Image (cartoon, rainbow, N blue to C red):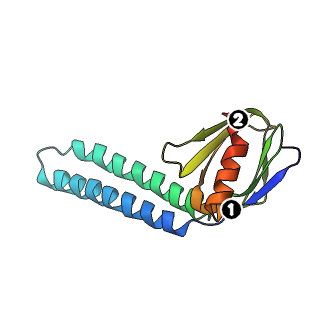
Amino acid sequence: MAKSENYELLPDKQGALWDVVMYVPVVVVLASLALQLWYGGTYKNFSYVLVFAASFIFLIGANRVLKSRLMILPSAPRSFEIDKKLVVVILRNGERVELVRELRYFSDYAGKSFGLTGVDLSGKKQQFVFHKAQFGGESNFNDIRSRLAVYK
């Protein structure tokens, strides 16, 4: 890694579709169970727990689809640069996040995504998740993973 490598990210529309297929039925089932319990009258208090769970899972799914997969939110990563001592993540709103300390790379067991965590220049811990389809091909994804393996 003698020089800085820059990688542009692409929206992962197929992954977003799969995430929607996963999260929407769970939220619908939890919300419908909450409504049944609320109007059924027997376990009315348990419906609060189910509404909370449905809301929580909805927020997780919306963040995953809009930020991680489709890169629509302003805090979504648009590209990143790998250097010897740091990784710079450029967000959609134009902000540059330089991960300079405690930089860690986490790969999943399936080999379809990886995460980066680190502390930026202001001392705030930052976390990012990147998916295989965002790199436009298997070779780019494997190249990036091999470069980031230094930070494991």
Q: Nearer the viewer, residue 151 or 60?
A: 151
Rate crowding at label 2 as few (under 14), some (14 to 19) or many (20 or more) other CA atoms within 10 Å. some
The residue most toward the top is 102
Where is the C terminus found, in terms of image quarters?
top right
Residue 57, x across and y down, in percent: 40, 51
The vertical placement of 32 against 144, above or below, is below
Residue 103, x across and y down, in percent: 72, 35
Mark 1: which amino acid?
A: Leu
Where is the N terminus found, in terms of image quarters?
top right
Residue at 63%, 63% in the rendered image: 137
The vertical placement of 11 against 95, above or below, is below
Q: Which mark is residue 63?
A: none
Rate crowding at label 1 as few (under 14), some (14 to 19) or many (20 or more) other CA atoms within 10 Å. some
Residue at 56%, 50% in the rendered image: 113
Task: Evaluate whether residue 4 shows in this view.
Answer: yes
The vertical placement of 85 against 72, above or below, is above
Instruction: Give the image quarter of residue 21.
Output: bottom left
Instruction: Give the image quarter of residue 149.
Output: top right
Residue 63, x across and y down, in percent: 53, 55
The residue most toward the front is 139
The answer to the question of whether label 1 and label 2 lie on touching residues, with beta carbons closer than 8 A, is no
Mark 2: which amino acid?
A: Tyr
Q: Which mark is residue 151?
A: 2
Q: Which residue is mark 1?
A: 9
Q: Nearer the viewer, residue 128 or 30?
A: 128
Residue at 58%, 65% in the rendered image: 70
Pair 1/2: label in front: 2
Viewed as shown, does residue 51 lie left or right of 62?
Answer: left
Q: Nearer the viewer, residue 68 or 109?
A: 109
